[in-house]
Image: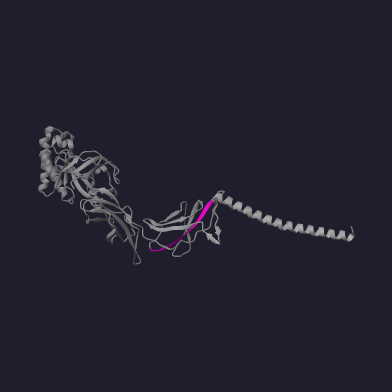
Amino acid sequence: MKIQDRKQQKNNCIININLIKTVRKVFGAAVLVSGICYMGCVTAGANTNMGVPKTEIVNKQVIESVSFAKVSSTKKGTKIKWNTSKKYQGYVIYRSKNNSKLQKVDTVIKKQYLDENIETGESYRYQIKPFYYKKNKKVFDKKSSMSDPYVAKPYGADNVCVVSFKDYKYISWDLNELASGYKILRKKGNEGWKEIVTLTKNIDMYEDYDIVSNEKYQYKVAAIENVDGQDYISVYSTSVNVGDLKGIDVSYHNGKIDWKKVRKAGISFAMIRMGYGTSKGGIIDSCLDYNYKNARKNGIKVGLYLYSYADNVREARNEAKFTYKMLKKYNKLDFPMAFDFENTYRNKKKYKKLNTKIITTYCDYLEKKGFDTSVYSYMDFFHKAVDYKKVSKYGIWLARWTNSTKNFYDGGIPNVQMWQYSAKGKVNGIKTAVDLNLNVAH
């Protein structure tokens, strides 16, 4: 081979080697980029499987990790809810009032928050910042967008309940101290809701006399709050029917009674002990004045009774005189004055005539003074120790404990108006067991 040919071949080899090196560099870079992309995909997939949230980008549009679902009013504040497809372990709530600077207000675990620290008529916006934990360290993700402005409504009327009386419905609720009035809606049977009254005072009850017997009624109550001359209306609270002429009878033995709680427990009337008899008249029950005034104050119908110890006509008359004196002060009664005559030692057939005379003496004295009366005792006493046909004209308050209102039975005794069906009742507002009664005269 000639020298020139060898030189040319060598040059061609050098060119080929350089070309190979260039190709290798380009190919290696491509492999490296592909490897990085592949590792990025694997890493991203691993993070997704681990539940580590990341903001995704699709067609250059940012998909938020948290989005608002609903902002609404409740009886106790403004409720916000949000959605997320990620598995966060908590959320920080930020709030702006009237477009002011955002401030942190709380941290929650659930995807909702009740903002109770609000002012009626003010405009609020909210923002959510989610977080998760990684190696026991709190890691925050991107904040949500701001919610739309929401004007806060007043706190509502809570614990709305209805007690049924013979000729009206008694609607009550918890007072809202900021309210200037209330709106009441009513629904009769299958008819629609209609506003029946707007109250301009912050009171906690309303008596609806515009009703039809045996018709089913429901009620809604909303609070009104006036701010700078503008009325704001809260959400409506639906009523619960909790009473049907159910009552109690009480004395100092039941301690100090929270009559507001008793009313809300569905008790519509109370027989309150005036006192107990003595040979010369009677002794006043130490809780009479408190029970009488507070029961009436809370819309509960009131009746009184005297526990008798009379053993003869003279003592019966003295107890009647004592009762009449007391009735001059405690004369606003919704039920007849009851004569409680039940002493076990007098439950004998031999006392039947005298027992009947004692009862008629007491009741006739008060009837002539213009007061309606009734007689309380238990069924066996009426059957064995009283001529119940003679005393039933006054009205009978019958004790027959079944602990249920479903099994009423008068035992053939005429004119039973009230039935004491339990001595072991539990009523909110009364710490002791209490006697339960049902008005069966309506």
Most extreme residue toward the right, as rendered? 2
Is most of the magenta stretch helix, strand or loop?
strand
Q: Is residue 312 visible?
A: no
Left or right side of 291 for 131: right
Q: In the picture, residue 180 is in which quadrant?
A: bottom left
Q: How many marks?
A: 0
> Percent from the top left, x then y, of residue 422?
24, 40
Whether 128 is among the magenta residues is yes
> What span is in magenta?
121-132
Left or right side of 244 for 8: right
Whether 89 is among the magenta residues is no
* Residue at the image point whose x is 34% and y is 57% from the top: 156
Q: Quadrant of the N terminus?
A: bottom right
Left or right side of 90 for 275: left
- Work out whether 106 lies above or below 276: below
Residue situated in front as seen by the camera: 289 or 86:
86
Q: In the picture, residue 379 is in which quadrant?
A: top left
Q: Is residue 321 visible?
A: yes
- Work out whether 30 lies above or below 335: below
> Percent from the top left, x then y, of residue 320?
13, 44
